Image (tube, rainbow, N blue to C red):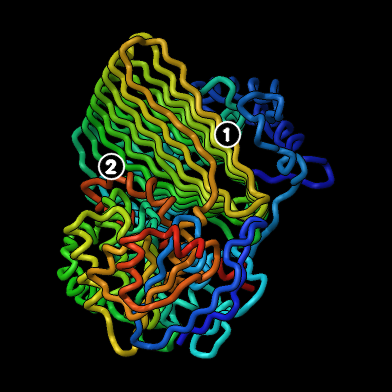
Amino acid sequence: MLEIKNLHVSAGGQEILRGIDLVVKAGEVHAIMGPNGSGKSTLSYILAGRPGYEITRGSVHYFGEDLTALLPETRAAKGIFLGFQYPVEIPGVATMTFLKHAINAQRKSRGEDELDAMGVMKLVQREAGKLKISADMLKRPVNAGFSGGEKKRCEILQMAVLQPLLAVLDETDSGLDVDALRLVGDGVTGLRAPDRAMIVITHYQRLLDHIVPDFVHVLAKGKITRSGGKELALELDREGYGEVVNG
Amino acid sequence: MVKWSMAEIATLEHALLSEVKAQEAGMASVSPRLRAVRQNAIRRFSKTGLPTRKDEAWRWTDLSLLREQSRTVAEPPVDPKSMDGPFAGLEAWRMIFVNGVLQGEASDLPPGLCAQSLRAALQDDAAIADRLRDSADAPFLALNTALLNDGAYICVAADTRVSKPLHLVFFNTGNAQIRNLVVLEPHANVTLLESHYGPAGAEYFVNNASDVQLGEGARLAHYRDQAESQNALHFHFLNARLDAHTHYDGFTLTRGARLSRFEAHVEIAGSDALCSLNGVSMLNGSQTGDTTCVMNHLAPASRSHQMFRTVLDGKSQGIFQGLIRVAKPAQRTGATQQIKAMLLSPHAVQNSKPELEILADDVKCAHGASVGQLDEAALFYLRARGIAEAQARALLTGAFLDDAVAQIQGSDALDAGQVQLNMRDTISTWLAQKSVIENV
């Protein structure tokens, strides 16, 4: 599904990623862990297509297609979803309106029929219920005045209604208390599917108690320094990043 | 209608001055009261002519277009009922004016209500001339009075609630001086809509002035759509006077004209009045849109709120000048003014000048002005969810303008939700057309 080869990325004249190799297949969950400033968020932005990052070497292919040539909205329609570390507040656009635009823009781009207001409402409400998101929250502007937990639950709601093929979740656990973490973790786990892959970016192991990964990679100073199974996350949690970063 | 001959006159300003001077001779048939009002205006305009950028109130508004334009362009007749915009589909009484002259046959006038041609009203009752108010340092108002021709005269008797909106449709194809006089006697309740428009591309100069007087407890919902031809010059001077316990709810959508200025002077002369003055401006190309508001609190315990949102694309220029003045007796005044502009192009310019002049000591006034750009982080967020860039920009821009649209309060005769929805439709259409142009 996703093949990253020798990826080098710079932003603002500084090299952030220095040769990443990663292969993700359908159905897999990959965790990417690493200390602050290691380039985790940059990797997520490269996959989603955020302007301002320059790929200096290497390639990213998604279902065999050069991903870097596509607009962010095209990537979304092709099934890439980025769960933001800091979801953006959009005053004046109601959450439900936003979801309707997003769902139908993607459907239209794929040549599918658009859903009417009732269809969107039903779909959104079904998923919102699971994440304990109230109808009132859906009427409020996107993320405006939402608590940290509400913002992250809203990200998972978007993922649930947009049904991506590749979900990149950037520090979805940051700013969550224990209960919210469980809710979000269960939400994500419920979305695991044979045709869907996930890249879960996190600083801490605790999220991985809820979303159990197939593979764990350590990203440090712009490179993947170690890869392993889920037990690697536990080791990191016990011993810290010091050894793997320097070793 | 005013006509000039190219051969005789070099510029519009000279033409106007000559036209104004020529009025004096032709006023033998005018009632002495009206003559006095107009002679005063003639003197005033003859002395000053058009303002220049050296005048503080006009420092950002370049009138050279007015000086350059010297003629009217004849346009093929267009059906004045062919208008679109936020008020087109609403059930309303309609007064249709072509170049400021009431078209009785095309209009649908409310029975039993005084809504007629101002010219006819002045002929019937000379005392009406006394209600035409003058204002110092208002050259376009003086010009309008000097060249007074026609417009709407609406006078609503005390305690009358007009059950349908009254829609003034100003269709312009050539130069015009339009004067409206709107008098609401105590506790009258009226909804007044205005559409200003003309054939696409037509060049003309239209100078509007409206006197609006609200008697005690009266309520006026007053919504305007300025959609003049992209080559037109449009001026509108609104002189409003609010007595005690009145409620004025005003909204202006500015989207037309090459150069426009909406200048509102509101005098809050009674206590416990509420005045809302809001608007959206959408400018593109080489348009200049000037909104100038003077909110004059003269009496205690009244409130005024102003919220204006402007989006500017192309090489357009937006101007906002807003003065809140609170006189000494106007204790316990509450006044707000919030001005925001968003630049959609690196070549667009916004000049804002909010001012407070407070002489009373027990008041609550807040004002703020900002100029910004579209939030790139929000844009990426929407695109990452699959919303195409042009649509994402339109969505964010519409949301920005919606702050002002949401202020529209509606009336008994016109549901707030309906008029807000229509405004949003007109705004979305503008935004969609804009993005089509960008994608070509």
Q: Quadrant of residue A104?
A: bottom left
Q: Residue at x 76, y 34 (%)?
A: B14
Task: Kindly tell me whether residue B132 is visible in this rendering.
Answer: no
Whether B343 is drawn above or below A247: the answer is above
**Mark carried by residue A24:** none
**Mark carried by residue B144:** 1
Whether A31 is drawn above or below A140: the answer is below
Task: Kindly tell me whether residue B47 is visible in this rendering.
Answer: yes
Chain assignment, label 1: B
Left or right: B292 as drawn, with respect to B128:
right
Q: Viewer-proximal residue, B254 or A51?
A: A51
Which quarter of the image is occupied by the C terminus of chain B? bottom right
Q: Position of residue B83 (x, y in %)?
A: 47, 63
Q: Amino acid at mark 1?
A: Asn
Whether A182 is drawn above or below A161: the answer is above
Q: Residue at x 65, y 43 (%)?
A: B2
Q: Position of residue B353 (x, y in %)?
A: 55, 30
Q: Which residue is mark 2?
A: B190
Q: Amino acid at mark 2?
A: Val
